[in-house]
Amino acid sequence: MVCKYTDPEWTPLFALAAGVVVDTGGTLSHAAIVAREYNIPAVLAAGDATLKLKDGDTVLVNATEGSVTILS
């Protein structure tokens, strides 16, 4: 899931996501907390991910390194 930010209304979508990339946020943001609860990787404060990534892109989300790699 790639978005500018999340809020509680987005929570059901986390169950469908393999990872989360948000343009804004930090370790205490909604996206970070819910991603931890769902045990999925999240990269926060990606800046312009919503501009660079397009619908249908396959990406590798490395939460440890804080990187997002476009695979196709």
Image: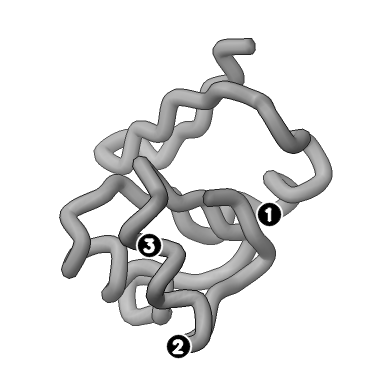
Q: Is residue 59 left or right of residue 64?
A: right
Dot 1: what SS?
loop
Q: Sequence order check: which comes first, mark 2 or mark 1?
A: 2
**Colouring convention used in this rendered image of the protein:** one colour
Near mark 3 (Cα within 10 A), the count class, few <14, some 14-19 or many ≥20, is some
Callout 3 touching callout 2 (CB < 8 Å)? no
Q: Is residue 53 visible?
A: no
> Which mark is first along the chain, 2 or 3?
2
Location of residue 38 by image quarter: bottom left
Do the numbered discs 2 and 1 sit on residues whose CB atoms are within 8 Å?
no
The residue under the point 66% across, 25% down is 57
Could you give the CA–CA distance between mark 3 and mark 2, rounded to whole angstroms?
11 Å
Query: Which element is circle 3 on?
Result: helix
Earlier in the chain: of badge 3 and badge 1, it is: 3
At a point 60% along the width and 71% down the height, the residue shown is 5
Q: Is 52 left, or right, of 7 in this rendering?
A: right
Task: Quickly name the residue at label 2.
Answer: 8
Identify whether 70 is placed above or below 56. Answer: above
Query: Image quadrant of residue 45?
Result: bottom right
Amino acid marked by disc 3: Phe
On the image, numbered disc 1 is attached to which residue?
47
Q: Position of residue 12 (x, y in %)?
A: 40, 72
Q: CA distance from mark 2 to mark 1?
A: 21 Å
Residue 14, labelled with which disc? 3
Helix, strand or loop at mark 2: helix
**Residues packed near mark 2 inside 10 Å, few (<14), some (14 to 19) or many (20 plus):** few
Judge depth for marks 3 and 1 and give the one in front: 3
Q: Residue at x 69, y 45 (%)?
A: 49
Q: Does residue 45 lie above or below 68 as drawn?
A: below
| Mark 2 or mark 1, whichever is nearer to me | 2
